Amino acid sequence: MFNTVVGIVFITVLSALLSHFMEKYTKENINQYVTSLNAQISNSIDRYVDDMQKVLMILSEDANLPVIADKKFVGTYEGYSAYNHFYDNIRSLIFFKGYKSLSVILFDRQEILTTDLNDGQDFKYIRNALNTNMYREITDSDQSMVLLPGFSLLPGKDNNTLFSQAIKLWDNLPGEKDFMVLSADKNLFSDFLNGVNNQAFDDILITTADGKVIFSLNSDVSTYDEFSGKDIGRLTEFDTLHFNGSSYYANVKNSATTGWYVVSLINQNKIDKQINDSKIIIMLTGIIVMVILILAVHLFVTRSTRDLKRLSKTMKNIEKSNYKIRSDINRNDEIGDLSQSFNAMVKNVLENQVLRNEAEIKSLQDQINPHFLYNTLDAISSLAIKRDHVRINEMVEKLADFYRYNMNIASHNVVEIGTEIQHVKNYLEIIQVRYGNRLSVIYEIDEDVLAYRTIRFTLQPVVENAIKHAFNEMSQAYIIRIGVYATEDSIVLEVSDNGIGIEEPKLRQIKQSIDGGGSLPHAEPRGGVGLKNVNMRFKLLFGGDYGIAIESEKGKGTKVVITGRKMQ
């Protein structure tokens, strides 16, 4: 009962703290998102303005423009041709870049050559439309390029122009104050912002520095007349604005190119509702967490009991001498420490077993080597009779290398794969002197793996058993194939022969013995203690997934595959 009361008090206090932090986090999260969105919009405006400036610069240098503006070409073929070429350029720009219109202002002639393809209109002349303050602002400006918020050629009749840019042509055309105006389409920005906004904000505004709203995504700009005269740049992050009887959280981003501001508005009631909903969720979450904690304690106790039983069962199974036995309990507590200690103990036991098996191998070598040495010396004697001094020298050197390598066997002693391959080559070249053309050896060695390391004395026991047992009672040519290659994370050594193969019952018994599950067959002990020991050493050094695999079929030869981890 006491624990339940403490838990309820704890959850209540925790929920209150989380509610406070959630309110702060929600505002910060929304503000971060809005700031990112505003930066995206502002950067889009900057890129759009830069692109318009580049287009105006290119068009101002158009060779057709001076011809169009010169009175002497009016009504001539040259003037008509220049008009058509210039018009084609303008039409392409408006279609592919989405501009509202482009106008050439012949101020000295009091004429405007303008086009608005969005309205389906080609170039047309508008006369007596130049007596506005905006035109005076362009002509009186010291800048060669002037940005015009809300500028339209036809005030009161064109509501689709967001802003325009003008470039002076005073050095390009015959007139002294002629210029060109390129206008941005308000619908283009509406489509873009609707895609970005996804109804997250109540409205998105673009204003000048003095508070004049030149664009509103969801309302008429006249709705924000009370913005006029405000210093928009002084608004702080997540500042609150009050107008039209409502309160809004505002986020402001300044455009470096235009000096304008992007203002995103979210109704305060919407945010407050989201925060209250979050508080309710936190309270429910607290209750759920308490239930989960109770269940977690119960599961922890149950799991610990189960793991202890598993570990006890694994310890009992070690009596069966199965070297694959490992505890797979992975925990960061006392039970995990006990599991690791058990695995270490098994490893020590297996290492001692490997040492005993190596003693058996050494004993076998002591029995086999005299016979091998006798046959080799007999072959050298035959070469001496033939006075083949070069072959005698080669045989003696390879025999010395062979015995030097064999006499240096140690548990987990590793060598480069290239060294192990050379040892097997020495052995086979000695053997081939006795067998002559009846024995062929094919090497398929990936040169890139020779620098990797493997366990010493891996291949020779396999090759020796192939020669001793695979070719028994065969009349055809003997072929041994030795391959070494790499996979993604492993090194594979293969020895295959075209010998008599192994019957399925005997093969199954050999596999079971090599894997540590039984004794070797007495008749024709193919693989023997040597293969079993190599398999155990590979698993100890590289892990349980590595070691020896044997494939064989009666009358179709045998393949021994030894897999180890890449090691340099």
Image (cartoon, rainbow, N blue to C red):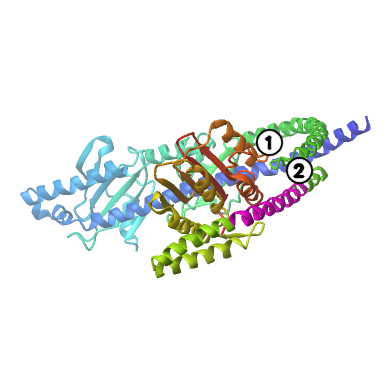
Front in this rendered view, residue 122 or 13: 13
Quadrant that contains the C terminus = bottom right
Where in the figure is residue 120, as x and y percent of width and height?
Answer: 24, 35
* Residue 259 in the figure: left or right of residue 11: left
Q: Amino acid at mark 1?
A: Ile
Q: Amino acid at mark 2?
A: Arg
Q: Is residue 423 magenta?
A: no
Evaluate whether residue 143 shows in this view. yes
Magenta-highlighted residues: 344-369
Residue position marked by numbered label 1 in the rendering: 275
Image height check: is 380 above or below 272?
Answer: below
Quadrant that contains the N terminus = top right
Q: Residue at x 63, y 57 (%)?
A: 366
Evaluate whether residue 239 shows in this view. no
Q: Residue at x 93, y 32 (%)?
A: 2
Q: Are marks 2 and 1 in contact (CB under 8 Å)?
A: no
> Element under label 1?
helix
User: Does label 2 or label 1 sit earlier along the sequence?
Assistant: 1
Numbered mark located on residue 331 in the image: 2
Where in the figure is residue 102, as x and y percent of width and height?
Answer: 27, 47
Extreme residue toward the right, this view:
2
Magenta region's main secondary structure? helix
Q: Is residue 350 magenta?
A: yes
* Residue 26 in the figure: left or right of residue 116: right
Where in the figure is residue 356, as x and y percent of width and height?
Answer: 72, 51
Where in the figure is residue 133, as x and y percent of width and height?
Answer: 34, 51
